[in-house]
Amino acid sequence: MRLTTKGRFAVTAMIDLGLHHGGGPVTLAEISGRQKISLSYLEQLFGKLRRHRLVESVRGPGGGYCLAKDMGALSVAEIILAVDEPIDATQCGGKENCHDDQKCLTHDLWAALNERIFDYLGAVSLRQLVDSQKAKQAARESGVTQVHDMRDTAGKRPTPVSA
């Protein structure tokens, strides 16, 4: 799968935005500082996220970005696709011309993997990721040593585990 920094950074920035949701617009400079992502790169990503109506921009003093959709209705797949990140493990981009302009022997394997990846990312909401981060932060603050990550909680809220 060709998931580059573009998709990873877009998801990271959206989680950051979700963590600060409800506190007014968040500036890209704030996200850049917290997540160590280049401000100019964030500007490019948020331009695409805005065009896909995943975020809204607020102009003027105190301006920044807010989520345009409910976090529970926004999937990781939507975020990745909004920044033009292909979710594709095939070498041919799904064109079936991988081997001398013919479908290669493993094309169907990689195409099936694409479907599974897309289904998984489509089933993970921004709300789940934000809630998971909040649970991890609360666990750190309360002394709980471990919180299950998304691999264990697909479709469920994270569960704190005491040591």
Image (spheres, rainbow, N blue to C red):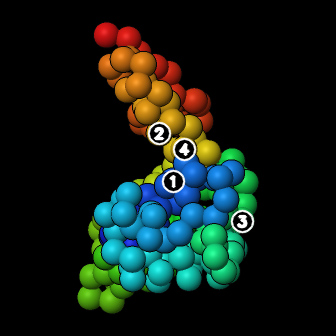
Callout 3 crowding tier (Cα within 10 Å): few <14, some 14–19, many ≥20:
some
Residue shown at the point (47%, 81%) measured from the top left: 43
Residue shown at the point (47%, 39%) measured from the top left: 133
Query: Is any atom of residue 86 visible in this view?
Result: no
Horizontal side, residue 25 vs residue 93: left or right: right
Identify the amino acid type marked 3: Ala
Per the image, the residue denoted by label 3 is 68
Per the image, the residue denoted by label 2 is 133
Distance of mark 2 from mark 1, alpha carbons? 8 Å
Per the image, the residue denoted by label 1 is 15
The reply to whether discs 2 and 1 touch (Cβ–Cβ < 8 Å) is yes
Horizontal side, residue 120 vs residue 60: left or right: left
Distance of mark 2 from mark 4, alpha carbons? 5 Å
Please state which of residues 4 and 28 is positioned toward the viewer in this rendering. 28
For mark 2, give the secondary structure.
helix
Distance of mark 3 from mark 1, alpha carbons? 13 Å
N-terminal of the pair, mark 2 or mark 3, is 3
Identify the amino acid type marked 4: Val
Residue shown at the point (49%, 71%) measured from the top left: 28
Distance of mark 2 from mark 3, alpha carbons? 20 Å
Relative image position of residue 52 (x, y in whole percent): 65, 77
